Image: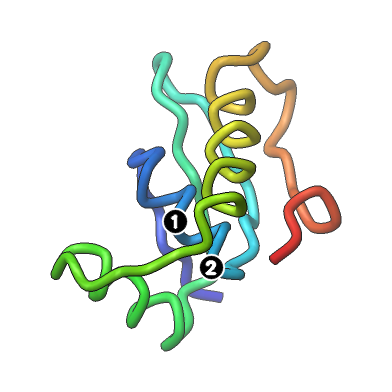
Amino acid sequence: MNHFITKDLYLSSYLVSSGCPLESHNRIDGITIFSFDRTRELELLVESYFSLKASVNPIKYDEAMKLLRNLAMGPKPRHENTLSSRVAA
């Protein structure tokens, strides 16, 4: 499967809060990399994000931001973490 990978916490929070499941995250040299399955829906969301046309539920965005920030700042994972039920749309 083709993946979309980003280190952008804000973009990742937008994608999660818009219903895109976070497949994994990994810390490399102190930088957290977020990985999503690349779908047409994800590509459209990324396009709307960078064209400043994105809209999102602020409560879902805040929840996603807190979760992803904790993943990024928390202890270094021993292996690649997969999130499925923890991040709900």
Q: Residue 18 placed where, x, y %?
A: 53, 68
Q: Is residue 47 above or below residue 89?
A: below
The amino acid type of the residue labelled 1 equals Tyr
| Image-based side of 42 in relation to 23, left or right | left
Look at 46% across and 29% down and name the residue there: 32
Check the picture and name the quadrant holding the N terminus. Answer: bottom right
Where residue 63 sits, quadrant-wise, is: top right
Look at 69% across and 22% down and name the residue there: 77
Circle 1 residue: 14
What residue occupies the far front of the structure in this picture? 58
The amino acid type of the residue labelled 2 equals Ser
Q: Residue 69 placed where, x, y %?
A: 54, 27
Q: Give the secondary structure at mark 1.
A: helix
Callout 2–callout 1 Cβ contact below 8 Å: yes
Check the picture and name the quadrant holding the C terminus. Answer: bottom right
Where residue 31 sits, quadrant-wise, is: top left
Q: Which mark is residue 18?
A: 2
| Image-based side of 88 in relation to 35, left or right | right
Look at 72% across and 30% down and name the residue there: 79
Q: CA distance from mark 2 to mark 1?
A: 6 Å
Q: Give the secondary structure at mark 2.
A: loop
Q: Residues within 10 Å of mark 2 (few under 14, many from 20)?
A: many
Relative depth, front residue between 38 and 69: 69
Look at 60% across and 31% down and name the residue there: 66
Relative depth, front residue between 37 and 65: 65
How many numbered discs sit on the rendered protein? 2
What residue occupies the far right of the structure in this picture? 85
Q: Which mark is residue 42?
A: none
